[in-house]
Amino acid sequence: MSDGVKTHRDGHVLEVTLERGKVNAIDVPTSQALAAAFQELHEDKDLRCAILTGGGDKIFSAGWDLKALNDGEMSLDNWWEADEYGFGGFTGLTENWALNKPVIAAINGLAIGGGFEMAMACDLLIAADHVEFGLPEMPLGIVPDAGALQRLPRRIPHNIAMEMFLLGRRMSASEAAHYGLVNKVVPKEKLMDAAREWAASIAWSAPLAMQTVKEVQREIECVPLEQAFHKMRTDPMPVYRKMLKSEDAKEGVAAFVEKREPNFKGE
């Protein structure tokens, strides 16, 4: 795959690596290439999850390509209406409400601006121990509106999110783990091993059950408890309904009773 995005398939896992210039900045073609990779994940029944990382060990992504923005190749004014960043919004992840397969962010270096927003759109976040997160938009006269304003105050205490927004303070990987923003912090040399271990566990599990978790969580997030139960009982939720009647559900129960390994097929 071109435009600074490389993909590699390892069994049921798709590895997506952002390798563009020194800082892995994202312009329109790069966002389209990332979106194409995640669309492949969405459409290919043999793929069950993905790992997203950056090349090297210094920068995961610096986010928006400000040079391209300054040169007029990108626009700020209602940028989301252009529909040119690919399916799923910026990077194919930040507004991808159709992708039910898990994505693991293996954060190899500095994640700032849109790079931080891309990471927050993933389902599981593993960070190398030297990683920092930041939102430097305010001194530029802009705001992080591709996910940070929407997601960060839901993940960490509101006043800490406001500190990052208004003061541009960076957050270390250990502090992010303290707040639960990242799942795990590991030495940089063990980052991909940790991500692949989790990906292998997901790929081994029943695909429809994994996809149901994402579908349901997306539908009931921030919904009062009673309403969450009601939505699960009455809303369409096609993956959830399919899972309840699936052969995999029968296979999982049978394997448990028969004390053997299950053979899940995603059906």
Image (spheres, rainbow, N blue to C red):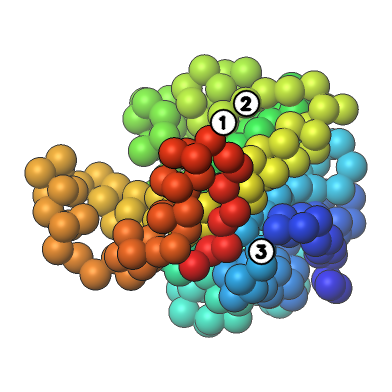
Q: Position of residue 242 (x, y in %)?
A: 36, 67
Instruction: Say left or right for 111 vs 77.
Output: right
| Residue at x-position 67% and y-position 54% | 50
State the SS at label 3: loop
Please name the amino acid that badge 3 sits on: Leu
Is 10 in front, or is 178? 10
Q: Position of residue 247 (x, y in %)?
A: 44, 63
Q: Nearer the viewer, mark 2 or mark 3?
A: 3
Q: Which residue was labeled with disc 3? A: 47
- Check disc 2: other Cα within 10 Å, few if <14, some if 14-19, many if 20+: many
Is 85 in front, or is 204? 204
Q: Quadrant of the N terminus?
A: bottom right
Is 184 in front, or is 255? 255
| Residue at x-position 40% and y-position 64% | 246
Q: Which residue was labeled with disc 2? A: 184
Is 14 in front, or is 18? 14
